[in-house]
């Protein structure tokens, strides 16, 4: 009589034992491979719609380690499972599974797309847009995913969002455009990317500061050069102070020299 047993160590050992001859045949099965195959089976057999699809997707998310209990739970990092996956640049299958399990792609306030943009995950951005993420949805402070990518200097995210059709010039509640945020933080490569996409470098903050003026005040020489190449006005003043005057006041010598060579007005 044959009896079947399994024993677990670093791998699953399946063997059959002949109770008479005590001959044992071992078959080593890699646990990771077995788990991967099982996840693939659940994905392929997922219903196309309805509660059954949601339930199986949630089960799959749990097995993948994306969710502990519920799809909208908030962890110690204050993120939902989908926002966390986007922040970490999860693959398209993981994002699809979370959405199928009921995760909200376009919630009020901070969105998963913003998490991906903030961390420069272009592939995750593209995957979520295919799933229905709103490119131009704004946070409670009026920021778009593109503005957040510009603020953090994430060039790959800027290029992906621009390529997918994001509005390049939406300003937040204070009047900060993506170009202004990139300039304020000295992200020259981000300015160059926005310029290639066609963003307007001369839109002003609500109080009248331009991207050029802000970069001059903050001493970002590379940003000044990138803004000039993108077509920014080198002379537009704020409260009577030109970019040249404010850079001279703060002793940003490299900027002063550069603007003087361009013939900027005091």
Image (cartoon, rainbow, N blue to C red):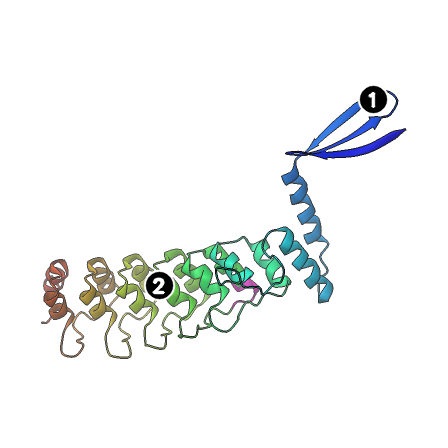
- Residue 105 is left or right of residue 255, and the answer is right
Name of the residue lying farthest toward the right? 1
Residue 145 position within the rendered picture, expressed as x and y whole percent measured from the top left: 43, 66
Residue drawn 19% across and 59% down? 221
- Tell me the chief SS of the magenta region: helix
Asked if the stretch drawn in magenta spans residue 10, the answer is: no
Say which of 109 and 235 sits in front: 109
- The part of the image, by quadrant, that contains residue 9 is top right
SS of the residue under disc 2: helix
Q: Which mark is residue 150?
A: 2
Mark 2 or 1, closer to the camera: 1
Q: What is the quadrant of the C terminus in the image?
A: bottom left
Q: Quadrant of residue 255?
A: bottom left
Is residue 264 at all visible to an observer of this figure?
no
Question: Callout 1: 10 Å neighbours few (<14), some, many (20+)?
Answer: few
Q: Residue at x 13, y 68 (%)?
A: 244
Where is residue 140 drawn, in percent x and y?
A: 43, 75
Residue 64, horizontal then vertical, whole percent: 61, 51
- Marks 2/1: CA distance? 69 Å
- Residue closer to the observer: 255 or 196: 255
Q: Kindly identify the residue that appears in the image at 13 percent across and 78 percent down.
A: 240
Q: Which residue position holds label 1?
A: 22
Q: Where is residue 84 drawn, in percent x and y?
A: 51, 58
* Lower sequence index among marks 2 and 1: 1
Q: Vertically, is 198 above or below 65?
A: below
Magenta stretch bounds = 129-133
Asked whether the viewer can see residue 79, the reply is: yes
Instruction: Tell me, yes or no, whether the highlighted magenta stretch contains residue 130.
Output: yes
Instruction: Tell me: 196 left or right of 116.
Output: left
């Amino acid at each position: 009589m044959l009896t079947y047993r399994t024993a677990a160590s670093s791998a699953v050992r399946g063997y059959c034992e002949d109770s008479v001859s005590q001959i044992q045949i071992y078959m080593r099965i890699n646990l990771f491979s077995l788990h991967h195959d099982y996840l693939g089976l659940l994905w392929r057999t997922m219903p196309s719609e309805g509660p059954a699809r949601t339930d199986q997707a949630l089960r799959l998310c749990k097995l993948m380690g994306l969710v502990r209990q519920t799809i909208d739970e908030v962890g110690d990092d204050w993120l939902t499972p989908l926002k966390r996956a986007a922040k970490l640049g999860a693959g398209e299958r993981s994002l699809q599974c979370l959405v199928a399990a009921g995760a909200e792609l376009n919630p009020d306030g901070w969105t998963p797309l913003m998490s991906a943009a903030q961390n420069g995950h272009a592939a995750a951005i593209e995957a979520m847009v295919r799933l229905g993420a709103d490119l131009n949805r704004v946070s409670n402070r009026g920021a778009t995913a593109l503005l957040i990518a510009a603020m953090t200097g994430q060039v790959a995210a800027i290029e992906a969002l621009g390529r997918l059709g994001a509005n390049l010039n939406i300003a937040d509640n204070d009047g900060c455009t993506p170009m202004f945020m990139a300039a304020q933080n000295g992200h020259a490569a981000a300015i160059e990317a926005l310029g290639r996409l066609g963003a307007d470098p001369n839109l002003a903050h609500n109080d009248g500061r331009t991207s050029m003026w802000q970069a001059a005040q903050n001493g970002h020489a590379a940003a000044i050069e990138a803004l000039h190449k993108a077509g920014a006005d080198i002379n537009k003043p704020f409260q009577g102070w030109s970019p040249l005057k404010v850079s001279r006041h703060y002793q940003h010598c490299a900027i002063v020299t550069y603007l003087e060579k361009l013939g900027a007005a005091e």
